[in-house]
């Protein structure tokens, strides 16, 4: 266990150190989320009715959840490259814990997701968002976001191991996650959707994630959304982590 923890931290550091050498990845965590926030706030926001709630307050929790869900795309790209370029085979020749490769990747995502959260929150504060909740709820919201991001890192880990190229890994992950974020309460009220989409959005985990964040950050009625969000995140992790590990073993012959 001590070796696993040590090797995981070393590989997580390796994955983070590589980011400054790939500015396009840093742009995905910083500039791209800001562009989405400004686009929805000032282009679409005036046409969307949110039942008395200012659109910027409605928007920021949904935008943060979407950004966090996509935070694991770096894991998909990195794992795909490492497997197909033979780097994982080199890892196998070293006296290191096998599980550290996947664990290091997903742990690095926690750090980049934390960066993405604060970029979006600061942007929201500049354009008029404000927390209408005690500090403990704000901190709980950040913790929930990191849990959601960690869960989706395992989804992207599996995508990266299944896809044949980094480009296809990025495309598959985008196609799988992007529609789910929009058919939810992230950007528009579910009640404004057609009946069929509304029925799907009501059970979409992204609706539960976003409503949980709104209840924690702006004080909307919570219901069971917070515990539901925790349950969904753990369920996603419990399903996709074993699948990713099994696929990794097949891909590397270990």
Image (cartoon, grey):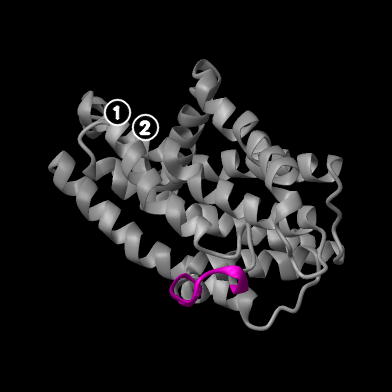
Residue pointed to by mark 1: 81
- In the image, is residue 193 part of the stretch drawn in magenta? yes
Labels 2 & 1 near each other (Cβ < 8 A):
yes
As drawn, which residue projects farthest toward the bottom? 223
| Cα separation between marks 2 and 1 | 5 Å
Q: Secondary structure at mark 1?
A: helix
Residue at image x 26%, y 58%? 243
Above/below status of 199 relative to 251: below
Magenta range: 191-199
Magenta stretch: dominant secondary structure: helix
Residue at image x 33%, y 65%? 239
Instruction: Pinpoint residue 46: horizontal percent, then vertical percent.
Output: 76, 50
In screen coordinates, is 50 left or right of 202? right
Q: Residues within 10 Å of mark 1 (few under 14, many from 20)?
A: some
Tell me the tag on residue 78.
Answer: 2
Viewer-closest of 58 and 164: 58
């Amino acid at each position: 266990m001590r070796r696993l923890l040590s090797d995981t931290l070393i590989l997580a550091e390796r994955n983070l150190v590589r980011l400054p050498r790939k500015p396009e990845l840093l742009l995905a965590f910083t500039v791209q989320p800001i562009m989405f926030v400004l686009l929805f706030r000032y282009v679409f926001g005036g046409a969307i009715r949110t039942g008395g709630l200012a659109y910027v307050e409605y928007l920021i929790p949904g935008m943060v959840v979407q950004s966090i869900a996509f935070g694991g795309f770096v894991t998909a790209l990195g794992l795909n490259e490492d497997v197909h370029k033979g780097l994982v085979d080199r890892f196998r020749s070293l006296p290191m814990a096998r599980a550290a490769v996947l664990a290091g990747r997903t742990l690095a995502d926690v750090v980049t997701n934390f960066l993405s959260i604060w970029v979006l929150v600061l942007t929201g504060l500049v354009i008029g968002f404000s927390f209408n909740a005690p500090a403990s709820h704000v901190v709980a919201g950040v913790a929930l976001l990191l849990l959601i991001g960690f869960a989706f890192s395992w989804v992207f880990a599996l995508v990266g191991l299944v896809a044949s190229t980094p480009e296809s890994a990025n495309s598959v992950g985008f196609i799988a996650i992007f529609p789910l974020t929009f058919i939810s309460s992230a950007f528009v009220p579910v009640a404004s959707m057609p009946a069929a989409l509304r029925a799907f959005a009501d059970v979409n985990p992204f609706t539960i994630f976003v409503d949980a964040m709104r209840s924690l950050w702006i004080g909307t009625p919570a219901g069971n959304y917070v515990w539901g969000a925790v349950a969904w995140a753990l369920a996603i992790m419990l399903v996709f982590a074993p699948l990713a590990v099994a696929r990794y073993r097949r891909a590397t012959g270990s």
